[in-house]
């Protein structure tokens, strides 16, 4: 982690095996008194000492590990929710960048979120029909939101179960990207969170944590072509990553890579977006990440860190050795949706 060697002064005893070696004049002898015993005025071999400056490693106590902030959680609060017999919509934490919804119905249920901007994207989520709640992020930032919950009646048509509107003012812009949600689903007890904490324990800065997580995922997760084919063959079945299973199996698709990286870094207090969009030149629909840092400095062939800005991180291509045609400088990525 770039620890610098310290300096300290220590006495060093210097031994000379041949203080008077070949070619050196023999020291002058004095004719002494009785017995001829005399005391030499010259230093004796093995007795010379001096003070010298030497390098020494710093003590472990000098290492200051990265300190993650308190875990930012997302919670469904049924007692704070509005709705009816079919839907409960919890908007009590919108200032923290998320909401929650649960539903009970006989057929497929979706939540659709819209904001006022004419070009703003619509966000749509599948909602379990057995009352199990999901957390959804409010990634559109501050503004006026409309929430529509509907039950499928035919094809892509949904009958309204509940609808409401809400003005959102975030505590700060990072809140939606610091917490668990339906597509980046983890908890304090998740194995991926434990692994992230383990990696962060050896890091000194947030950038060190990003690097450690990035390297870990690249080294330990490979692309699952079989799963990718299954997801493409069944587009109506919404795939959602099981992050601890990804860690256990060591395999995943782009969605898994992006979700896993986001979960691990968010759990350590580092804001991360999971991005869906297209990557040219082949217009591949893909998932990747962007992280935020105030620190300067650290560049790799796969992503570049810029001071005080969001930075692009694509673990799928990096872990599987894609060439620069896809990785590029980021200009070939078209962001569409943020989670």
Image: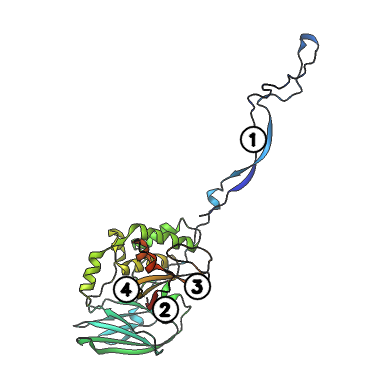
Q: Relative to 130, is 119 above or below?
A: below
| Quarter residue 87 falls in | bottom left
> Label for residue 284?
4
Element at label 1: strand
174 versus 19 height, above or below: below
Residue 8 in the figure: left or right of residue 281:
right
* Residue 240 position by quadrant: bottom left
Where residue 278 appears, as percent x and y from the top left, is 35, 76
Asked if disc 1 and disc 3 are in contact, CB closer than 8 Å, the reply is no
Foreground tag (2 vs 3): 3
Q: Position of residue 7 (x, y in %)?
A: 62, 46
Marker disc for residue 110: none
Q: Earlier in the sequence, mark 4 or mark 2?
A: 2
In front: 96, or 20?
A: 20
User: How far is disc 2 from disc 3 in space, using C-alphas?
Assistant: 20 Å
Asked whether 44 or 136 is in front, the reply is 44
- Tell me how far mark 2 sits from mark 1, CA to CA: 62 Å
For label 2, the residue is 97
Sort mark 4 into few (<14), some (14-19) or many (20+) by Cα contacts within 10 Å: few
Whether residue 262 appears in this view of the structure is no
SS class, disc 3: strand
* Marked residue nearer the N-terminal end (1 or 3): 1
Q: Which residue is mark 3?
A: 309
- Where 209 falls versus 168 (above or below)? above
Q: Is residue 7 left or right of residue 286?
A: right
Residue 61 versus residue 318 in the image, above or below: above
Q: Residue visible at 64% across and 35% down? A: 12
Q: Label 1 neighbourhood size at 10 Å, few (<14), some (14-19), many (20+)?
A: few
Q: How is the image coloured?
A: rainbow
Label 4, label 3: how far apart the Cα atoms are: 25 Å
Q: Which residue is mark 1?
A: 12
In primary-sequence order, the first of circles 4 and 3 is 4
């Amino acid at each position: 982690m770039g620890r610098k060697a310290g300096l300290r002064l220590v006495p060093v005893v210097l031994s000379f095996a041949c203080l008077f070696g070949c070619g050196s004049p023999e020291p002058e002898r004095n004719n002494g008194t009785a017995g001829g015993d005399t005391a030499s005025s010259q230093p004796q071999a093995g007795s010379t000492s001096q003070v010298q400056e030497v390098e020494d490693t710093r003590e472990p106590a000098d290492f200051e590990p990265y300190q993650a902030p308190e875990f930012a959680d997302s919670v469904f609060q049924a007692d704070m929710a509005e709705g009816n017999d079919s839907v409960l919509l919890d908007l009590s934490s919108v200032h923290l960048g998320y909401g929650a919804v649960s539903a009970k119905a006989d057929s497929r249920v979706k939540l659709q979120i819209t904001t006022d901007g004419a070009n703003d994207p619509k966000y749509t989520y599948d909602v379990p029909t057995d009352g199990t709640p999901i957390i959804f992020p409010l990634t559109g930032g501050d503004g006026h939101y409309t929430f529509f919950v509907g039950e499928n009646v035919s094809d892509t048509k949904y009958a309204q179960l509940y609808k409401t509107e809400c003005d959102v003012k975030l505590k700060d812009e990072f809140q939606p990207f610091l917490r668990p949600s339906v597509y980046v689903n983890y908890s304090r007890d998740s194995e991926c969170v434990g692994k992230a904490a383990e990696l962060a324990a050896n890091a000194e800065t947030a950038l060190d944590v990003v690097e450690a997580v990035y390297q870990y995922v690249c080294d330990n997760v490979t692309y699952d072509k079989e799963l990718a084919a299954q997801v493409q063959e069944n587009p109506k079945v919404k795939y959602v990553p099981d992050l601890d299973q990804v860690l256990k199996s060591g395999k995943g698709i782009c969605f898994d890579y992006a979700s896993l990286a986001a979960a691990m870094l968010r759990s350590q207090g580092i804001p991360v977006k999971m991005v869906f969009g297209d990557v040219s030149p082949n217009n591949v629909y893909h998932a990747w990440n962007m992280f935020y840092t105030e620190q300067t400095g650290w560049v790799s062939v796969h992503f570049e860190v810029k001071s005080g800005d969001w930075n692009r991180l694509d673990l799928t291509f990096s872990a599987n050795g894609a060439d620069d045609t896809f990785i590029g400088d980021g200009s070939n990525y078209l962001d569409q949706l943020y989670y």
